[in-house]
Each structure stands twice: as structure tokens, then as C-alpha cells.
Amino acid sequence: MQTMQQTEIPAFLVTLEDAFNTAMISNDVEQISRCITDDWILVTPEAGPVPRSRILGVISSGLLTHATMTKVATHACVAGDVAWVTGRGQNTGTFNEKPMEADEYITDIYRRVDGEWRCMLTHLTPAHGGLQGGL
């Protein structure tokens, strides 16, 4: 993962994001589960908050697949046992057997659980071709 110098991105967060991306494109529910907490939520513009069980179910069924997933981290913060990273991400795959692709701003919030960092919330916002970091 390439990072930008708007803020220093801790190396362990880059590693976590890379592992999460790899897990998602594996389409392997067990591998994905190792990256997320039991109460992980995905927030999407289309469906709002979606619980872990629903996302893992559609991946397990093959209804949702990912072929590529990349992120460029731009901002991050670590506060005790919680950390977040925000950036721009792109992914491709299929949904309901139809090709899909996304260009989004992504925020992943991580929590340290039993000594291991796991994502507890992923929030997606479509990029719509806007200027990164600009208003």
C-alpha cells in the first residue's frame, strides 16, 4: 500500500490494511473473519450499517466477490487500544453475478482485542471524482 505524507501512517496500520485487502480478495470468510471483530459493521451509502453476519453471508454464498482491492492511506490516529485510518480505495468484483467497481473514501476503525488489532467498523463514501483532501 502506498501512503501519502499528509500525516504519518503508522507501519502497523499499513500492514493491517494490506492484510484486510488480501483477505477480502481471497473471498474466504475465515480469512476475512481474522481481520474483523465479532461486532464489525460495514457502513455503505446504499444500505447504511450492515452487520458482519450479513456481509460474510453474501461473500460465503458467492453473491459478492472481490477481485481487486487497493487503498492509499492519507490520515491515521492511534489512541490506546483504538486506531483509525482514512484514505482512498478502489475495488472490483461482482455482485449478484454482475461486474462492479468502486472508488471510495474509506475509514477503518481498529480495536486491539486480546493483543491483536481487528477492524471494528468500515465506513465507505463514494469518491465521485472529487479532489482528495479539498473542499
Image: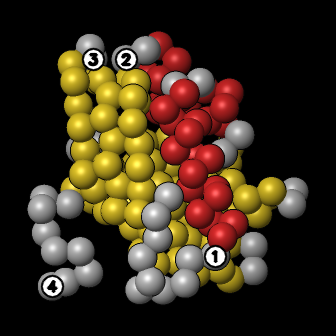
Report which residue position mark 3 lands on. 96
Q: Which residue is outermost to the right?
A: 114
Q: CA distance from mark 2 to mark 1?
A: 34 Å
Report which residue position mark 1 lands on. 10
Q: Which residue is outermost to the front?
A: 2
Q: Residue at left 24%, top 51%?
A: 103
Task: Pick whichever of labels 4 and 2 is earlier in the sequence.
Answer: 2
Secondary-structure class at tag 3: loop
Residue 1 or residue 76, whichever sits in front:
1
Q: Are marks 2 and 1 in contact (CB under 8 Å)?
A: no
Q: Which residue is outermost to the left?
A: 129
Which is closer to the viewer, label 2 or label 1?
A: 1
Report which residue position mark 2 lands on. 63
Which is closer to the viewer, label 3 or label 4?
A: 4
Q: Position of residue 59 (x, y in %)?
A: 47, 23
Secondary-structure class at tag 1: loop
Which is closer to the viewer, label 3 or label 1?
A: 1
Q: CA distance from mark 4 to mark 2?
A: 36 Å
Which is closer to the viewer, label 4 or label 2?
A: 4
Q: Is residue 21 visible?
A: yes
Residue 52 or residue 80, whichever sits in front:
80
